[in-house]
Image (cartoon, rainbow, N blue to C red):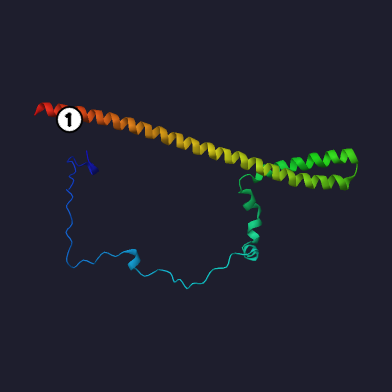
Amino acid sequence: MGWFGSSSSSKVSSVSQTVEEPHAQPQQFLEDLPPKFEDNGSVQKPPAYSDALKEFKLSDFSMSHFVSMPCFREAMITGFQAMGVLGTVTFLIHKNPNKSINWAVCGFFLGNVVGWEQCHSIRRKSFQAMEKAKEANQKKNEKKWEEKQQEDDEVMKKFNDIQGRNK
């Protein structure tokens, strides 16, 4: 059964060599073509910090932008936990609110950095494991393909042997 219910098998046309026509254009090479862009010899200056600062927008600092970042949530949770623990312990030991607030803020930033790096380390390891799994799967598929080719070669050899006997 073929396409659209036709019962006839499709025919494959034979490939024929093309004959060059006398009025055809000659073959063009890359070095024969004109350049697409002008090379005026001017060297571009390397980007400066001021150029990078001009690229910042107020929308880059929106909460929706931060929430969509991977590992942001984990880093914030770890930072708030460190802030609470360090602020509370410092207040209980020293009974000084200013000192405990300072330690709490430092703990928040330290916790953010630790949480961020820990999350990125876990993500990096998972991506590496995924790449190893892909490579192993590809090797397995290549091995199966080679075995299939060997089986096909054996079947073809048997077929040729049988055809040779029938002649």
Image quarter (top left, top right, bottom left or bottom right) of the N terminus: top left
Residue 61, position as x, y percentages in the image? 66, 56
Q: Is residue 50 above or below residue 107?
A: below
Q: Which residue is mark 1?
A: 160
Q: Quadrant of residue 154?
A: top left
Helix, strand or loop under label 1:
helix
Image quarter (top left, top right, bottom left or bottom right) of the C terminus: top left
Residue 127, position as x, y percentages in the image? 54, 40
Q: Amino acid at mark 1?
A: Asn
Q: Quadrant of residue 87?
A: top right
Along the viewing direction, whichever of 36 and 76 lies nearer the viewer: 36
On screen, residue 18 versus residue 120, left or right, reads left
Residue 26, position as x, y percentages in the image? 24, 66
Q: Residue at x 66, y 43 (%)?
A: 117
Q: Residue at x 10, y 27 (%)?
A: 166
Q: Residue furthest bottom?
A: 40
Q: Residue furthest left?
A: 167
Residue 35, position as x, y percentages in the image? 39, 69
Few, some or many C-alpha atoms within 10 Å of disc 1 (few <14, some 14-19, many ≥20)? Answer: few
On screen, residue 72 versus residue 28, left or right, reads right
Along the viewing direction, whichever of 42 and 11 lies nearer the viewer: 42
Q: Residue at x 51, y 37 (%)?
A: 130
Q: How many marks?
A: 1
On screen, residue 30 versus residue 58, left or right, reads left
